[in-house]
Image: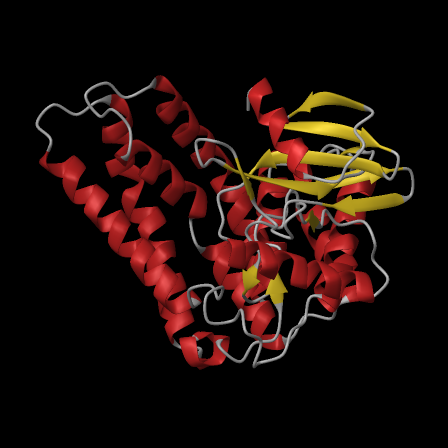
Amino acid sequence: MNDRALKILEQYDLEILSTRRGRGSYICETPQGLRILCDYTGSENKALFQNCIMEKIREGGYEKVDKILPNREGALISRDWEQNKYVVKEWYVGRECDTSNENEILAAVTNLARLHRLMQLGEDCEFRKNFTATAPTEEIRAQNAELRKIRTFIRKKNAKQDFERLFLNYFSQYYEQAAEAEQKADALSEYGNAALQKYPGVCHGDYNHHHVLMSGYDIATTNFECCRFDYQINDLYRFMRKILEKHDWNQRLGMRMLEYYAQVRPIPRQERQLLYIRMLYPEKFRKLANHYYGSNKAWVSGRFLEKLENLNRQEEQKNKFVRLLEK
């Protein structure tokens, strides 16, 4: 975002006292508190949905979410002369959750459970049609098809590089997990499209340490751009997976995260089963394969090989944790 984007602020009834750069944004000080100007890729309807869920959160007594502010014309999205889209949101003082600090990790998990209790909308919500996630059964099936396509592509290459040879060596063990996850998801009718269309819960969609701001004993949650109707355990899964990868799949930490979440929002049986299926699935392997497939395959960066070797080093510890969830 360049300095010209600051002209967008002229479309708002804001008294700007000062501005400073944030990550891909400008943070503005006003008499009413901090505001943030940032790019926006969604539609006006998505912005309305974001604000709808944040209003629901605030009704439950949770104030610190980054609600989008309307401009002078009442629109949530503003455009510059090139039709680039921006939003101005409420913002908060705080630092990102420290992923090396267990107390902050557990506070973030408790915070997520509290949000999930508030992020409930009716079956007839007007936004459901456009903002409902893909059912787990369909998602996993499509991901597995993509993995098979990438394997076929590499097999057909005449001159294989180190990453490609190692990928083929490891493929069977990871695909076995992927196929088992697909089979288990298919066996659970709760995870089909029909069931998801009735599920009242909304996910944040991108809940990670960057979007959890710590300020003393207070927490602000930001960046709801990926929110959608989805099984809320998926938020917990994504947060847990990223944290546990940083902690070598520490079993004690993982089980404490589950315990702290469940103290605030008890986990229904079917969502506990879905958490197991999600953890069983080799998501990091799939992501690495997709990044490779979308890259310049004439010269494969050494980073791909390094990441694949690191992934395999953690595999035993990950499997031990997954087995705990199966019980």
Q: Residue at x 42, y 70 (%)?
A: 185
Q: Residue at x 73, y 71 (%)?
A: 266
Q: Position of residue 27 (x, y in %)?
A: 72, 28
Q: Return the residue nearer the eye: 266 or 13.
A: 13
Q: From where the camera sits, is residue 324 visible? A: no
Q: Quadrant of residue 222?
A: top right
Q: Position of residue 321 (x, y in %)?
A: 59, 52
Q: Return the residue nearer the eye: 119 or 305.
A: 119
Residue extending farthest to the right is 217
Q: Return the residue nearer the eye: 286 or 206.
A: 206
Q: Quadrant of residue 227?
A: bottom right
Numbered-mark total: 0
Q: Is residue 288 above or below residue 325?
A: above
Q: Position of residue 17 (x, y in %)?
A: 83, 25
Q: From where the camera sits, is residue 28 visible? A: yes
Q: Position of residue 292 (x, y in %)?
A: 30, 32
